């Protein structure tokens, strides 16, 4: 996808601190961490947001949710973690390529919104 920051990160046109990669997804450290551990997991296919998930692309989301526990284990998030996906303006989505934030490494705020 032209002019998509995360599509550029996947192909290496923009550098990132990669923590995981396979055929379907890519994970890297958030550049502006909101917790001691803050990783983004993204599908390699360009999907705008969680609002654009349907029967044609949901298998990659299922795959990502199989990968997330592996990443969490590798990052030592034994005490737990949070998975967040912001959608659209009200959800404060700033990059319009579906991504799942993994946040952890400390006791997180009880408030979500
Ligand atoms: P969201 O606000 O949910 O769309 O999340 C986008 C996230 O991407 C934010 O947490 C940003 O800090 C992060 N981000 C933006 N640019 C980069 C980058 N070049 N490398 C890593 N993370 C980035
Ligand atoms: Zn993209």
Image (tube, rainbow, N blue to C red):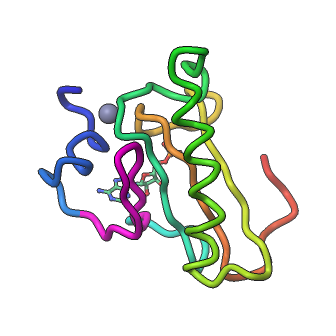
Q: Position of residue 66 (x, y in %)?
A: 63, 52
Q: Residue at x 18, y 27 (%)?
A: 2
Q: Would residue 23 appear left or right of 57 to someone viewing this image? A: left
Q: Residue at x 38, y 53 (%)?
A: 26
Q: Quadrant of residue 20?
A: bottom left
Q: Quadrant of residue 70?
A: bottom right
- Outermost residue on the left side: it is 13
Q: Would residue 40 appear left or right of 77 to someone viewing this image? A: left
- Outermost residue on the right side: it is 110
Identify the image quadrant of the N terminus.
top left
Q: Looking at this view, is 72 or 5 the one in front?
A: 72
Number of numbered tags placed on the structure image: 0
Rendered position, 80 above or below 94: below
Q: Would residue 16 appear left or right of 64 to someone viewing this image? A: left
- Which residues are drawn in magenta? 16-30
Q: Residue at x 48, y 53 (%)?
A: 41
Magenta: predominant secondary structure element?
strand
Q: Residue at x 48, y 36 (%)?
A: 98
Q: Position of residue 24 (x, y in %)?
A: 40, 43
Q: Looking at this view, is 110 or 40 the one in front?
A: 40
The reply to whether the magenta stretch includes residue 85 is no
Q: Quadrant of residue 43?
A: top left
- Outermost residue on the top side: it is 55
Q: Looking at this view, is 57 or 109 the one in front?
A: 57
Q: Position of residue 72 (x, y in %)?
A: 62, 71
Q: Position of residue 19 (x, y in %)?
A: 40, 70
């Amino acid at each position: 996808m032209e002019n998509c920051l995360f599509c550029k990160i996947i192909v290496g046109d923009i550098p990132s601190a990669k923590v995981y990669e396979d055929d379907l997804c890519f994970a890297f450290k958030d550049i502006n961490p909101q917790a001691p551990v803050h990783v983004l997991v993204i599908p390699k296919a360009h999907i705008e947001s969680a609002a654009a998930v349907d029967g044609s692309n949901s298998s990659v989301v299922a795959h990502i949710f199989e990968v997330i526990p592996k990443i969490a284990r590798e990052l030592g998030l034994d005490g737990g973690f949070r998975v967040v996906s912001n959608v659209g303006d009200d959800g404060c989505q700033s990059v319009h390529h579906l991504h799942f934030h993994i946040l952890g490494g400390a006791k997180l705020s009880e408030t979500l919104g």
